[in-house]
Amino acid sequence: MKKVFHYNIIPFFLILSLGGYFLIQQNLTVKRENYLNQSYMGYTLPSKISGLAALEFKGILSDFLFLKVSTFLGDKFIKREMLADKHADYIYNSVDVITDLDPWFWDAYLFADLLLTWDFKKIDMANKLLFKAREYRTNDFKVPYHIGFNYFYFLKDNMNGAKYMMEAASLPGSPTWLNGLGTRLSVYQNQYKPAIMFLSETLKKTHNPALAKQMEIRLNTLIALDKLEKAVQEYKKIFGFLPLKITDLIDKGFVKTIPQDPYGGEFIILKNGRVFTTSNMIHKQKKSN
Amino acid sequence: MLSGENNMYRKMISLIILSFKEGVRDRALIGAGLFSLMMMGSALVVVSMFMRDLDKVSVDINLSAIAFAGLLLTFFVSINLMAKDIDKHTIYCVLSKPFSRSQYIWGKYLGIMLLIFMAFCILTICSSITILFIKSQYEFYFKSFSWIEFYKAVYAQLLLLFLLNAVVVFFSTITTSSFITLLFSISTYLAGQTIEEVVVFLKSKNAMDMPLSESINAIIDIAQYILPNLSVFDLKVQSAHAITISYNYLFAITSYSLIYSVILLLSASLIFNRRELK
Amino acid sequence: MSKILIKKISKSYISDFKREKKIAVDNISLNIDTTEVFGIIGRNGAGKSTIIKMIMGFIKPDKGDITIDGKIPSDPDSRLKVGYLPENPYFYDNLSAEELLKFSSTASGLDKEKARKRIDKILQQVDLYSVRKQRLRTYSKGMTQRAGICFALVHDPDIIILDEPMSGLDPFGRKMVIDLIKDLQKRGKTVLFCSHILNDVERICNRVAIMDSGILKGIFTKQEIFESNGMEELFLNVVRGK
C-alpha cells in the first residue's frame, strides 16, 4: 500500500516543480535582459582564432556572425539608442572578421559601408573594408562604385570619386547611367542628386525590410532637401537674394508645403544657398548606452 | 561452382551489402538525416533576415548541412560499422566465411562508401529542392547563383568523406577499442582541416620576425605530408559566390583523395593481416 | 582420413597490464577425422576457444601447424566448406535472421535459388521461421544462439565448428542442437565442438579431448567414456590427475 501512495505523489511533485521552473524561467529572462542591456557585446573573436575554429564551416559562421552584428545594431536603431564610436569600431572589427571568413560576402561589406558612412561618418573605415572587397570581388562594379561615391559625396574628393566611378562603369553589369556619371560628378558637386541616385539604386536591391525602410526614410529626406534646394535657387534667381526662412518658400508660392523631416530635425537655409536639416539625417537619440 | 571470378565478385557484393544494410538501419543515421533536414529547413527562414546575398546564405546553410551530416555519418555510423565490428566480435561472422582480411577491409570500406554516397544523393536532392524553393521566392537575388558550382562543392565534400572514412578504417585496424578510433579519427579531421592555415601562419611568421628552428620546420614539413590536407575539399565559400572551380582542380583533389585513401586502406590491410582477433 | 590436422601448436598471450606471459595452449596435437564428432571439454579458460580461433584463422599459433582439408587457416579458401558458430554469438543487430543467412550462403558460394530453399528449411528446423524478418536486436539469447547455428549450417558445410553450442539454450533448445549434430553425423560431416557443459556430450561424440590450463589431458573414445561411469566422472578424474 505504501508503494501506491508513493507513486501517487510523484505527479504532485512534478506539477510543483514545473510551476517552480516556470517562475524561475520568467525571473531569469528578466534578469538576463538586464544583464544583456548592461553588458556591451562589442568584442569580436580575431579571425586567426575563429577562422581555425570554424574548420570547414567558415561560410555559415560568417552568416551567423553577420546576423548577430546586424540584429544587435538593428535593435539599437529601432530603439533609437545613441551610437558611439565604440559601435563603429565594433562594426568595423566584426565585418573585418566576417569578411576574413568569407572574403566575397558583399552583404557584410555593404552593411558596414552604409552604417559607417551615413551614421558614423567614418569614411576611412568604410573605404578600408571596401578596398578589401575590391581585392576579391574583382568583377563587381558595385565595389568601386561605392568607393567612388564615398570619395565624392563624403570626402568631397572629386578626382578619386571620378576615378572609381569610371572603374565601376568599365566592369560588367554596371548600369548605363554610370558611364557618364564619372565625368559629370563635378557638375553635381554640392548637390543632393548623386546621393538620391545612389540610394535609390541601392534600395532597389535590398531585401531586408527593416534596412530598406531606413534607406527609404533617408531617400525621402534627400528628395525633400533636393526639392527645397531647387526652390531656394529659383527664389534667388527671381528675387536676387536668399529667402530668410524656409517658410518664405510657401509664402512666395515656390512650394506648397514644407515636408516633415522624418528624423525630427528642422530644415534650414545656409548662407551659400544650400538646404540642410538640423537632424543631419540621424535619428534623435533617446538614451545613451 | 565454388570458385572463380564470378563467385569472388558475388562474395564481395554480399559483404558490401551486409555493411550497407547494417549501417543504413543505424539509428544515428536517422539523427544525422533529421538534423541536416532541419538545418536546410531553417534556411527558408534565416534567408529572409539578410539584405541581398540570399543565394550565398542559402548555399552556405545547405552545404554546411550536407557536410555536417557527412561528418555525423562518419563519426557515428562508420565507427559503429568498423571499430565496433572488431570490438564486439561481429567480425567473426564475416571472417568465418571465405574472406581474407584484405577483402574484409575493402568490402567494409566500400559498404560504408555506398552508404555515404546514397545519403549524399538524398541530401543533395533535398537541398536542391530547398534552394529551388528559396530561389523561386527571391528570384532577384539569385542572379549569380550557379547549380554547377553548387554540385562541385557537394562532390568535393564527398571526396573528403572518402578520405576520412579510409582514416576511420585505418585506425580501427590498429587500435583495440572503438572509442580510441573515434578519438584518433576526430583528431585527424581537426588537424587535417587546420594544417594548411597553421602552416601558412607559421611560415609567414617565420619570414617576418621569429625564425623557426630547423627541427620545427622539419616537423611542419613532415606533418604536412603525413596529415591529409582536408581544406582542399572545402569549396563551400567559393560555391556560395558561384566562383568557378576549374575541372583541373577537381581532378587534382579527386586524385589526392583516391591516392590517400588507397594508401591508407593498403596499410590497413597489411596491419590487419597480422592482427589477432581475440 | 583426417579433415582437421593440428600439429604441436602452442599459443601464449601477454597480458596488457602486468606484461606477464600466459600460456593458453601448450604443445597440442589433434587429428579430427571425416565423419567424426569431436568434442573438446574443459573448464573456462582451459584453452578450448583458443584452439578453435586458431583453426578459424582469427589468431595465429606461436608454434606448430594447422591444416583444414589440406589448407592453412590464413588461406581464405580453407573456410569455404566450414560452418562456424562463435561463442556467445553476437550478430549484426540491425539485420534480420533471413538477411544474415542470405549473407552466409552467398559468401560461401551458394546460388540464389538454392540459398533461398536452404534458408527457409533451416529456419523452420530451429523454429525461427515466423520471426525471420525481425531484426536480430529483438531476439532473446536462446533465439540468437539458434540463429547462430543456422548461420553455421545454412551453406551445408562439410566441417562444422561449434564454440559452446549449448550455452544459453533451454532444454528444448539443447535437444534441438543434439538432434542437429546427430543428423550431421549421419550425413557424414565432420563436427568439432567445445563445451564446458558435460551433459549430453557422451551421447553425441565419437571422441572427446579433455583440456586443462592449456594442456591436453587425454583423448577418449565413446567406449572409454562409457567404461569410466560417464563423462562427469571421467572428467573430474582426469583433471584431478588420477
Image: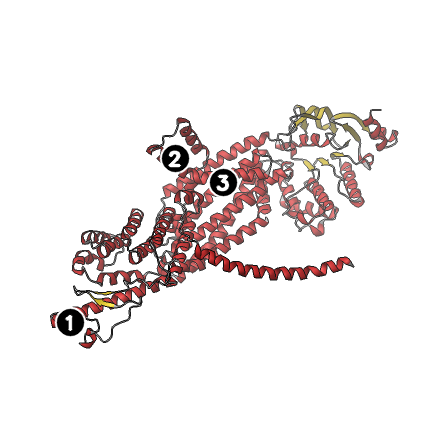
Residue A111 image point, x, y percent: 34, 56
Give the quadrant of residue C80.
top right
Res. A234 in view: yes
Residue A99 image point, x, y percent: 36, 48
Q: Tag 2's secondary structure?
A: helix
Tell me the colour scheme of the image: secondary structure
Q: Which amino acid does label 2 sit on?
A: Leu
The label number, if any, that marks residue A235 in the structure image: 1
Count neighbours of disc 1 (C-alpha within 10 A) and say few if under 14, some if 14 to 19, many if 20 or more.
some
Viewer-side residue, C21 vs A109: A109
Count neighbours of disc 2 (C-alpha within 10 A) and say few if under 14, some if 14 to 19, many if 20 or more.
some
Above-or-below relation of C51 to A133 = above
A91 horizontally vs C134: left or right: left
The chain letter under disc 3 is: B
Above-or-below relation of C103 to B207 = below
Q: Tag 1's secondary structure?
A: helix
Give the quadrant of residue C179.
top right
How far apart are the alpha carbons under marks 2 and 1?
A: 68 Å
Res. B5 in view: no
The chain letter under disc 2 is: B
Q: Tag 3's secondary structure?
A: helix
C231 horizontally vs A225: left or right: right
Residue C23 image point, x, y percent: 70, 25
How far apart are the alpha carbons under marks 2 and 3?
A: 25 Å
The label number, if any, that marks residue B202 in the structure image: 2
Residue tagged 3: B164
| Numbered disc in front, either 2 or 1 | 1
The chain letter under disc 1 is: A
Give the quadrant of residue B276.
top right
